[in-house]
Amino acid sequence: MSRARVAVVLVVATLPGVLRPVVHAQTADLAGLWALNRELSQFPREVGFGLAGLSPEVGGTNPAPSGGRSRRGSGGSGGAFRPPLPESEDDARRRQQVTEEVRNPPALLTITETASAVTITNERGRVRTLRTDGKEGALQLDGGAPIGVIAKREAGRLVVQYRVDRARELRYTFQRVASPPQLVVEVEFIEQGAGDRVRRVYEPAGPADVAAATAAAVGSSDTAATARNAGASPAGIQAAGTGPTGGTSPTGGGGQAAAPSTAPAQTGPDAELKGLTRLGVVVEDPGPQAAACGVIQKTIESAVSKRLTDAGFRILRNTSEDTYVYINVITTSPSNGFCVSRYDAFVYSYTTAKLTYQATPALVQVSLLHKGGITGGASSQHGDAVLRGILEYIDQFSTRIRDANK
């Protein structure tokens, strides 16, 4: 399958007893559009972190099944009981969400890569961009709690570690297989020297995979949108250099990052968009495969800039230092003459914030707005379809910003 450069994050595994493919270090490129193969993936009945305070030996010497529980039981004499560690509300939310993500993995993953980062998008439009420099950053989970994350490349693999709390970590390892073409994701729950393991397998996505995953995601997306409109949850914050997972209150006016303030926060629908009058425009180069399908970086940049100018915004050229619109497209061609693209539009800004797990404020990147979609069709018409979808999102962004400033 041909690929354009794009970024995403994912999870993968194979059933017990199935022969595992040989993973070659030279196939480190993860970029592409990937569909989960449930038959080749592990779905253990129980998977997750154990009860805080129980040592790995509790429960006797029951052998671990292939995939799933590796150290828990309901009785037995071995092992010592340790008093449970205190768990904060944020710790509990982090633990619950990362466990749920493993139990219900994405059906479709879009991944793009640069020399310094990997971006992973699922069929529901959740995007996470991970720096691969091995330094700890932070991102905001959908449930609202921040989580520490370290990502790095090791011998042709992408290794991502999430710090759930002081005693628990979740580790994802992504590897690409050359033959058969697969993306293998291994997930390990790490606590007190042991933990559950799950292995899942993704394969190059075709038009039918895209259609099925998109249709399945529509219902849940509509439900989530209704919940957001009805009861405005706090917007999400994530560290500079990590991927978008939600919005938060910016400094306002598209300006530079400001120090934390003790003044009362603005409230109400889209309060974080008030005062926003100028925007940068950054369009990621989608690569040669996208160009062959009619998806052209300069064409998108010009059309987005014109649409924003017509809406009354001042456009700042070629900058990501201020509040800016970011466009990312990943395009594949699973069959001759047929193209599939995942496209996402964001509005980003920067601010400083005091994170619950750090002693001093940190510069964080803020995702104010996000929309994403998938489209497929003949290569002769594909570029126009992608551009129409992106411009629809730009119009929606403009309307929300305009309404917030009334």
Image: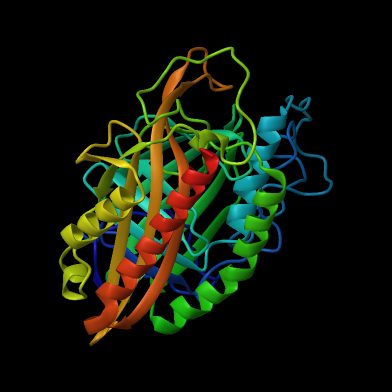
Give the image location of residue 24, x and y in percent.
Answer: 26, 62
Number of numbered tags placed on the structure image: 0
Q: Which residue is depicted at the point 43% across and 25% down?
A: 351
Give the image location of residue 400, x and y in percent.
Answer: 51, 48
Please say if 69 is above or below 13: above
Position of residue 161 in the picture relative to residue 280 (left or right): right
Q: Which residue is depicted at the point 45% across and 31% down?
A: 275
| Closer-to-camera residue (355/202) | 355
Please say if 323 is above or below 394: above
Q: How is the image coloured?
A: rainbow
| Closer-to-camera residue (91/121) | 121
Position of residue 201 in the picture relative to residue 25 (left or right): right
Asked where in the image residue 180 lies, by quadrant, the reply is bottom left
Asked where in the image residue 93 lies, by quadrant, the reply is top right
Q: Which residue is depicted at the point 51% across and 52% down?
A: 187
Please say if 252 is above or below 116: above
Quadrant location of the N terminus in the rendered image: bottom left
Quadrant location of the C terminus in the rendered image: top right
Give the image location of residue 94, x and y in percent.
Answer: 63, 39
Give the image location of residue 240, x and y in percent.
Answer: 38, 31
| Closer-to-camera residue (145/304) | 304
User: Could you tell me if residue 20 is visible in this image?
Assistant: no
User: Could you tell me if residue 269 is visible in this image?
Assistant: yes
Please say if 212 is above or below 353: below
